[in-house]
Image: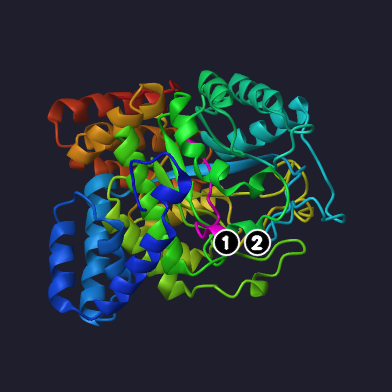
């Protein structure tokens, strides 16, 4: 029986409720009156239920689909303006004891070289990332209690935060590691992590168990309930995601929103971020083996419907996707993207062709500077801001500010100041020219005159060599 307040995975992600939801959506996919009613509710910026959002995803009325896209773009602007947060993944180790059928790190893959970074190698990777201009990382590691124990992750976080190279500093470390215990989540919180991210991969329990035949990750309930344990351990910013292509996308969409509803019901705060990766080629992995792949058009509609249903959440897209797809979904709801990414262990310091330890192939090979310039030329502000995390605006404090729109009083100034840092320290001359013009234009959008004057003063100080101002 579906119960969003339950702490049991099979009750807050209820299989029959999802099937009933899909049947309901199919029955109403051309019901213009109901779709109008749902869109009217969505325009109040309070979100939609998984069932309401599923009707929009199933909608076959082209005129209404265009309304969905228009509304998604407007909601994204209302909550996040034209800011796009920049980050990079950092792969620590590809040792893994799981048997996941869609991941090249699986234990039975004997021809992928296994590698684990030493702390000295981590320092070199972080310096390389700082030299690009990155301030925010997402740590990645396979699940292996011998090679990648929590102590190794904690030591790595400490190493990353300790490195101050030239004007560079990693100011926020998000962590994407396997489900663990409440006690271990407490240790991660104490280590100063930002968001704890864990992808469900698939919410379909039978498919999940087939795709995870061996290893600790094969326990569906333990994995699905991990975000609850993370919150119990004091981590109040958690990130959700599914790997689209493993199971029918409409099933995953409903499950993803049910998970968000569960977190809101139990903890009073929904997911800080939602990621939308798709199955893509990798060492010994052929996406064609999974027959639930989705077209770019369907993928774009999923992004738009998530944005409409969960207006407050940050939405993340990686370099799995091509520049063309990334450009389209930026308009429809994405608020965070990676740039200059490497998905191999040691990939930032090794020559580029050496990607035989990569978790997946990239579709966007541009440098961070190229991505920054591309964003600015489209009118977006690349933001390297980490202020909310360091000012304690996390969890319900962040959500209340975000849902009320007050967060914008901090976000635009912080985005402009961190972009100025990037332009001064890392940008190519052409990128700097574009960026300076963008900052000058965007200053006019800061609503409070007093705040605007403070930002102007701080921008001058950044140009003179000072760093790390924030609201």
Q: Which residue is drawn at 78% across and 49% down?
A: 351
Q: Which residue is drawn at 62% across and 57% down?
A: 209
Q: What stretch is highlighted in magenta?
A: 195-205
Q: Residue at x 30, y 30 (%)?
A: 396
Callout 1 touching callout 2 (CB < 8 Å): yes
Place of residue 207 in the rendered image (x, y in percent of width and height, measured from the top left): 58, 63
In the picture shown, does residue 184 fall above or below 74?
Answer: above
Nearest the eye: 94 or 350: 94
Q: Is residue 390 left or right of residue 184?
A: left
Q: Residue at x 77, y 44 (%)?
A: 350
- Residue 210 numbered mark, or none: 2
Q: Residue furthest right?
A: 110
Neighbours of disc 2 within 10 Å: few (<14), some (14-19), many (20+): few
In the picture shown, does residue 54 fall above or below 317?
Answer: below
**Image color mode:** rainbow
- Asked if the magenta segment contains residue 420, the reply would be no
Q: From the image, which quarter does the C terminus lie in?
A: top left
Neighbours of disc 1 within 10 Å: few (<14), some (14-19), many (20+): few
Based on the displayed image, in which of its 4 quarters is residue 391 positioned? top left
Tag 2's secondary structure? helix
* Camera sees residue 338: yes
């Amino acid at each position: 029986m579906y119960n969003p307040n339950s702490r049991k995975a099979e009750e807050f992600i209820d299989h029959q409720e999802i099937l009933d939801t899909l049947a309901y959506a199919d029955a109403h996919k051309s019901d213009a009156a109901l779709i109008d009613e749902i869109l009217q509710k969505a325009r109040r910026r309070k979100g939609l239920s998984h069932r309401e959002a599923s009707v929009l995803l199933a909608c076959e009325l082209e005129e209404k689909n265009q309304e969905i896209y228009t509304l998604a773009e407007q909601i994204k602007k209302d909550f996040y303006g034209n800011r796009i947060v920049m980050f990079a993944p950092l792969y620590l180790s590809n040792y893994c004891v799981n048997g996941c059928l869609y991941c090249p790190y699986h234990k039975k893959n004997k021809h992928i070289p296994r590698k684990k970074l030493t702390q000295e190698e981590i320092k070199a990777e972080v310096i390389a990332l700082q030299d690009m201009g990155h301030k925010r990382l997402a740590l990645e590691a396979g699940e292996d209690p011998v090679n990648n124990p929590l102590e190794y992750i904690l030591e790595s976080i400490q190493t990353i935060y300790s490195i101050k190279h030239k004007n560079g500093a990693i100011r926020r470390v998000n962590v994407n590691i396997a489900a663990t215990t409440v006690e271990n989540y407490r240790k991660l919180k104490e280590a100063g992590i930002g968001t704890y991210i864990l992808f469900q991969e698939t919410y379909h329990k039978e498919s999940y168990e087939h795709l995870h035949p061996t290893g600790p990750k094969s326990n569906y309930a333990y994995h699905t309930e991990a975000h609850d344990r993370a919150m119990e351990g004091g981590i109040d910013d958690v990130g959700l995601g599914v790997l689209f292509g493993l199971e029918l996308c409409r099933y995953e969409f409903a499950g993803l929103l049910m998970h968000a509803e569960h977190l809101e019901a139990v903890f009073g705060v929904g997911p800080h971020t939602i990621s939308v990766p798709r199955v893509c080629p990798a060492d010994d992995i052929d996406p064609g083996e999974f027959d639930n792949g989705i077209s770019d058009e369907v993928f774009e509609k999923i992004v738009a419907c998530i944005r409409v249903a969960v207006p407050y959440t940050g939405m993340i897209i990686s370099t799995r996707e091509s520049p063309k797809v990334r450009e389209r979904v930026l308009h429809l709801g994405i608020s965070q993207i990676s740039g200059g990414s490497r998905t191999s262990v040691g990939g930032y310091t090794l020559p580029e062709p050496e990607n035989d330890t990569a978790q997946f192939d990239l579709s966007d090979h541009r440098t961070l500077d190229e991505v920054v310039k591309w964003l600015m030329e489209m009118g977006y502000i690349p933001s390297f801001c980490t202020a909310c995390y360091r000012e304690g605006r996390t969890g319900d404090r962040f959500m209340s500010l975000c849902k009320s729109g007050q967060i914008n009083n901090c976000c635009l100034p912080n985005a402009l100041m961190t972009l100025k840092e990037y332009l001064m320290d890392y940008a190519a001359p052409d990128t700097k020219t574009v960026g300076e013009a963008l900052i000058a234009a965007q200053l006019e959008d800061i609503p409070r005159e007093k705040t605007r004057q403070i930002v102007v003063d701080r921008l001058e100080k950044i140009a003179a060599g000072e760093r790390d101002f924030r609201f």
